[in-house]
Image (spheres, coloured by chain):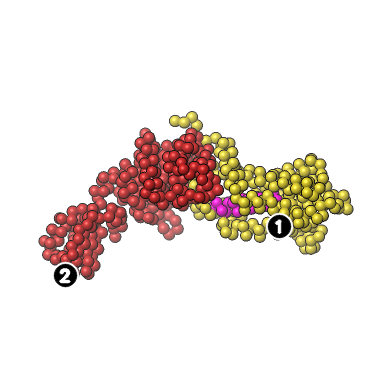
Chain colours: A red, B yellow
C-alpha cells in the first residue's frame, strides 16, 4: 500500500498571513485521518494544497505520486469542500449523475445518494434542500465516483444530529471497505469517533500526530476553579501539571488531568481556597487549551 | 484496478452539456429572455414594415429578421455566458469543479455548445415567427445560410461573454452586459436600419463588431455592405481582442483563487 497524499515542508502565504508554515505529512492508503484544529488553524489550506486547489509557496504536495492537478490523480479522489456552491435548478439525482460522468468507474447513482442518506430527496431540486441536506448532497458528489481517496472538509457542518450520524456511519463503512479518508473537523469528539489517526494543526503547523487515545491522554480532563484568600500569582503553579491557567485577583481557573495532585501541592504551598469547584472539563474547551497556549 | 485511469472526455462533454442545457432551460430569466425577447422586438420594429421592399427589391421583413437574428445570437452569447459565468463564480461553483476531474476546457466547451444550441433554437423560433406571422418568404437555402453564418460567426460574442463573466461579479454582470450589448446592437443598425440613424452613428457603425456580424446575415439576402472576407476579418480581429480580455480576466481570477 503506497502513499496517497504527501506534503513536504509545505508552506502557504496569503499576502501578510502565512496560513501553513511548514507541514510534513504523509497519508497512506486505507488510513482514516482527521485534521483537527481550531478555526483558522490552516486545515482547509492544507487540504487545498493536497488537492492542488492552491499552490504551495514553498515545499511540495503530491497526490498518488503525481502533481495534485493531474487529472489521473483527481480521478482517484472524491472531494467535499467548504464554501463551494452548486446550481439550484438541477435535481439531486441529475447532479450526481453529472459528477459520475467525471469518473472512470462510478457507483450507481442510487447507491451514491443512499450513502449520503438523501434517498427521499433524490428528485428534489437542489435549491429546495436545507443546509444539512445540501451538505449531504456534497457528500454524495464526493462518493459517487467510487474514488480510492476522499477529502472531506468539515463534512458534518450544518447537519442535524441524525444526518450527522448517518454520514459518520457512511464514512466508517467506506473506510472499512478500504478507502483512504482525510477529513477536517474542529470537534475533537468527531475526530475521536471517526479517525485512526489525528493530526492536530494549530497556527499552520502540526503540533500532534497520533492515535485518538494518545491525543486524549494529553488533554486535561478536569476543570478546577476557586477563590484564593490572598492574591496569588502564576508562579505558585510552577512545576504543576496544569493547563489553560488563568489567575485573576479573585478567581483562579485551570485544567488538569491530575486535579488531586495539583490541589495537594497547592495546599502544601499554603494556598487558602474558598468556593473550590472541580468539574469535568468540556472536551472541546480542553482541546482548545492545548492548541491556544500563550 | 479499473481498466482506465480517467473518464472518457466525450462522455464528460455530453453529460456536462446536457446539464448546462437543463440548467439554462429551467431559469426563465435566461430561457425566456433569450428565446422570446428577439421575437418581441421583431413584433415592434419588424412586423409593421414586414411586407415592404427596399428600392433594390430586398424584403424589409427578411432584412429585419436577419438583423434580429444577429441580435438574438449575440444576446445568448453575451447574456448566457456573461451573466451565467458571473453567477457561477458568485456561487463558488468553480471551486468544486476545480477539484473534480473535469478538465476546465471541457467545462467551457460545454458552455459554448449550450449557447450554440440556444442560439439555434432562438433563430428557428424567430424565423418561423417571421414566416408564419409576418408572411415573409425566402428560399429555405437563404434561411439556412443565415442560420449557419450567424452560428459560425458568433465567436467574438462568446469571447465577449466570457470576458464580462470573468471580469465582473454576479451583481454587475447583467448591467454591464446591457450597457455594452444594447448600445452596440442599436448603433450597428440591428433594431432600426442604419440609414434611419443619425449621421454620427452611421459613421461609427463600421467599426463595431455587431455591424460586421450582421453583414454575414444581410449579405445572404443580397443586402450586405461589404464582402464576406471583410466581415470575417473584422470578426476575427474582435475575437482576438475579446479573447485576450477574457483570458486576462480568467487568469486574474485564477491567481486570486487558486494560486
Counting other residues with Cα less than 10 Å from the Cα at mark 2, is it few (<14), some (14-19), or many (20 or more)? few
Residue positioned 83% across, 50% down in the render: B59
Q: Position of residue B68 (x, y in %)?
A: 74, 52
In the displayed structure, B175 sits above or below B148; it is below
Q: Which residue position is annotated with label 2?
A: A230
* Kind of element beneath mark 2: loop
| Residue A142 visible | no
Closest to the observer: B200 or A135?
A135
Q: Position of residue A283 (x, y in %)?
A: 28, 53
Is B82 colored magenta in this rendering? yes
Could you say which quadrant of the image residue B252 lies in? bottom right
Is B52 colored magenta in this rendering? no
Q: Is residue B230 left or right of residue B111?
A: right
Q: Is residue A105 left or right of residue B202?
A: left
Q: Position of residue B100 (x, y in %)?
A: 49, 43
Q: Which residues are magenta?
A: B72-89
| Residue B181 visible | yes
Amino acid at each position: 500500500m503506497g502513499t496517497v497524499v504527501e506534503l513536504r515542508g509545505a508552506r502557504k502565504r496569503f499576502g501578510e498571513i502565512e496560513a501553513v508554515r511548514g507541514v510534513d505529512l504523509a497519508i497512506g492508503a486505507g488510513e482514516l485521518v482527521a485534521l483537527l484544529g481550531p478555526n483558522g488553524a490552516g486545515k482547509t489550506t492544507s487540504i487545498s494544497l493536497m488537492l492542488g486547489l492552491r499552490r504551495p509557496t514553498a515545499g511540495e504536495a503530491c497526490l498518488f505520486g503525481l502533481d495534485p492537478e493531474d487529472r489521473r490523480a483527481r480521478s482517484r479522489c472524491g472531494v467535499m469542500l467548504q464554501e463551494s456552491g452548486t446550481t439550484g435548478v438541477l435535481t439531486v439525482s441529475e447532479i450526481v449523475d453529472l459528477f459520475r460522468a467525471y469518473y472512470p468507474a462510478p457507483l450507481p447513482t442510487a447507491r451514491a445518494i443512499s450513502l449520503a442518506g438523501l434517498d427521499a430527496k433524490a428528485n428534489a431540486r437542489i435549491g429546495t434542500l436545507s443546509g444539512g441536506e445540501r451538505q449531504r448532497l456534497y457528500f454524495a458528489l464526493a462518493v459517487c465516483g467510487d474514488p480510492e481517496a476522499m477529502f472531506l472538509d468539515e463534512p458534518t457542518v450544518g447537519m442535524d444530529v441524525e444526518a450527522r450520524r448517518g454520514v459518520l456511519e457512511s464514512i466508517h463503512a467506506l473506510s472499512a471497505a478500504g478507502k483512504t479518508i482525510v477529513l477536517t473537523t474542529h470537534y475533537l469528539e468527531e475526530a475521536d469517533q471517526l479517525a485512526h489517526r489525528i493530526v492536530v494543526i494549530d497556527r499552520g503547523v502540526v503540533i500532534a500526530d497520533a492515535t485518538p487515545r494518545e491525543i486524549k491522554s494529553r488533554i486535561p480532563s478536569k476543570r478546577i476553579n476557586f477563590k484564593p484568600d490572598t492574591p496569588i500569582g502564576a508562579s505558585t503553579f510552577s512545576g504543576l501539571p496544569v493547563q489553560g491557567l488563568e489567575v485573576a485577583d479573585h478567581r483562579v481557573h485551570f485544567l488538569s488531568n491530575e486535579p488531586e495532585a495539583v490541589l495537594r501541592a497547592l495546599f502544601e504551598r499554603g494556598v487558602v481556597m474558598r468556593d473550590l469547584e472541580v468539574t469535568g472539563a468540556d472536551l472541546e474547551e480542553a482541546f482548545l487549551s492545548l492548541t491556544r497556549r500563550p | 484496478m479499473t481498466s482506465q485511469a480517467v473518464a472518457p472526455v466525450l462522455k464528460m462533454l455530453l453529460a456536462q452539456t446536457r446539464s448546462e442545457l437543463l440548467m439554462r432551460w429551467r431559469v426563465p430569466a435566461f430561457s425566456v429572455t433569450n428565446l422570446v425577447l428577439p421575437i418581441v422586438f421583431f413584433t415592434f420594429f419588424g412586423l409593421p414594415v414586414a411586407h415592404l421592399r427596399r428600392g433594390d427589391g430586398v424584403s424589409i421583413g427578411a432584412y429585419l429578421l436577419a438583423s434580429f437574428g444577429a441580435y438574438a445570437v449575440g444576446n445568448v452569447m453575451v447574456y448566457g455566458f456573461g451573466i451565467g459565468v458571473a453567477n457561477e463564480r458568485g456561487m463558488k461553483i468553480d471551486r468544486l469543479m476545480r477539484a473534480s476531474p473535469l478538465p476546465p476546457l471541457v467545462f467551457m466547451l460545454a458552455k459554448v455548445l449550450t449557447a450554440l444550441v440556444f442560439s439555434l433554437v432562438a433563430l428557428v423560433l424567430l424565423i418561423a415567427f417571421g414566416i408564419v406571422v409576418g408572411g415573409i418568404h425566402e428560399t429555405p437555402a437563404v434561411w439556412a445560410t443565415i442560420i449557419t453564418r450567424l452560428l459560425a460567426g458568433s465567436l467574438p460574442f462568446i469571447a465577449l461573454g466570457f470576458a464580462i463573466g470573468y471580469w465582473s461579479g454576479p451583481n454587475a454582470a447583467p448591467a454591464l452586459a446591457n450597457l455594452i450589448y444594447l448600445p452596440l446592437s442599436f448603433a450597428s443598425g440591428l433594431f432600426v436600419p442604419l440609414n434611419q440613424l443619425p449621421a454620427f452613428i452611421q459613421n461609427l457603425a463600421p467599426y463595431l463588431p455587431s455591424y460586421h456580424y450582421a453583414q454575414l446575415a444581410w449579405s445572404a439576402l443580397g443586402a450586405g455592405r461589404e464582402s464576406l472576407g471583410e466581415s470575417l476579418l473584422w470578426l476575427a480581429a474582435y475575437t482576438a481582442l475579446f479573447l485576450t480580455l477574457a483570458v486576462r480576466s480568467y487568469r486574474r481570477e485564477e491567481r486570486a483563487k487558486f494560486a
